[in-house]
Image: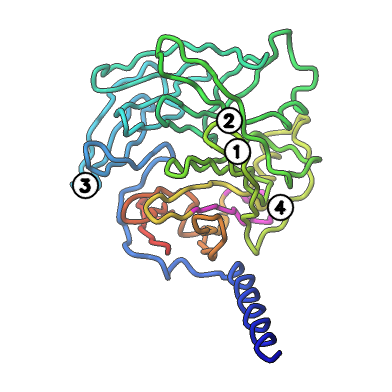
Amino acid sequence: MKNIFNIIFVVAIVIFCAACSNDVVKKHDEFLKEKQALPWLPALSDICEIKGREVVLFVANDGYSICFFDIEKKRIDTLISKTLSRVSNFCYNSNNETIWMQLNDKNLNLWNSKMPTGVVCPFVKHYDEQIVWLCGGNHPFFSCGDIVYTGFIPIKSLTGEFKDYAKFRAKSNLIAAWDVSNTDSVKCVSLFGERPSDQPKEMFIDDSYTAAFNVEDSIIIAGTELSQNVVVMTMMGEKIKEKKLTSKFYVQPEKRDFSQENSATEKIKYWENNMLFRGLYYDKHRKLYYRVLDIGKRSDDETFMKQKSDWALIVADSELDKKYEVIFDGDNYRPVIFIGKKGVYVRTTKNKTMDLFVFD
C-alpha cells in the first residue's frame, strides 16, 4: 500500500511540474548568442540554401528586384534584376531551385536560372464554384514539390456576387494549393485551412492567417490572430487535430465587428491596443515551433503609433507542447524573425540589424 501511495505521489508531482512548465517565462538575454549578426532584413525575406550556401533572399527597396545576402561571405548580389511588376510575396523551392513570385492578385510568376526574366503562369482560377484571387502580406506563401501554397480571396461565385461577403469570408477556408507541374496552366487543386474551434464567432477582424510548414512530417500548423488554438493539417488540408498554443499573458481582445465599415485609423488602433497572435514558424534545425503574441499598447493616446508593443515568443517542441515563452521589449526588438542554421534572427529597432538567438 505504501508503494502505491509513493507511486501516486510521484505521478502527481510529475503532472504538476509539467503543468507549471507551460507558464515558464524567460528573458531574451538568456538566449542571445550574437549581436548584429546580420544586417537589417526587409519583411519580404527568406533564409534558404542555394548550392549548399545559406543565403537570405529578399525583395530590394525598389520592389522589382530579388537579391541575396551570403551569410558566410557577408556579400549582397542581385538574383533577379527586374520583375514584370512589383513583388508582393515570394518563396524558394530548394529541390528544383526555382522562385515563385506573386506580382499581383491574379498571377504567379516562375523564375529559375534557365528563365532569368521569369515567366507568367496563367491561372485556372475557378474552384468549388468560386473565382479565386491571391492575397499576399501576412498570408501563407510556400512551395513544396509541384504545389505552391498561397493565401486566397474568394472574389465571387460563378453564379454571381456573394450575398453577404463578410459573413461568408469569416467562415471560408484560407489557404489555396496550386498545382504548378504544368506552368502553362496552373490549377487550384484545393482550398482549405479552417479557423480553430475557439475562434470567436462574433468577432471578425480581417483575413490574417499564419501557417508553419513542416515538410519533414508532412504537416501544416495554422492559426489566426484571435485563436489560442492552432490547427494541425496534412499538406493537402485534411484536419488531424487542434492544439492549444498560447501565452500566460493572453487576454482576449475586446469585441469588435470589422465586417462593417470602419476607418483605417480605428482598425489600426484596435490592432495596436489589443493582444493578437502574429507569426507562426517551424524551426527544422531544432525541431521547434514558435508563435508570436503581440502584447499590445493599451493606450487611447493619439500618439499610440509612436509607441512600441512588447511581445512574447512562445516556444514549443515537435509535439506542439509549450516549453516556455520569451519576452522581448518593443523598444529594442520587433516581432520580425527569420530562422537559419545558427539560430533565430530577430530584428532590432535601433541599429538596423538582426540579433541572433538560439532556443533549446
Is residue 119 shown above or below 329?
A: above
Q: Along the line of sight, which residue is nearer the eye, 267 or 35?
A: 35
Span shown in magenta: 289-305
Camera sees residue 36:
yes
Mark 2 neighbour class, 10 Å CA radius: few under 14, some 14 to 19, many 20 or more: many
Q: CA distance from mark 1 to mark 2?
A: 9 Å
Sequence-first tag of 1 and 2: 2
Residue assigned mark 3: 74
Of the residues under marks 4 and 1, which one precedes in the sequence? 1
- Give how far apart the Cα atoms at labels 3 and 2 are: 36 Å
Q: Quadrant of residue 144?
A: top left
- Judging by the rendered image, the residue that carries numbered circle 2 is 175
Q: Position of residue 42 (x, y in %)?
A: 40, 40
Answer left or right for 147 relative to 294. Answer: left
Q: Are marks 2 and 4 in contact (CB under 8 Å)?
A: no
**Mark 3 crowdedness (10 Å alpha carbons): few <14, some 14-19, many ≥20:** few
- Quadrant of res 151: top right
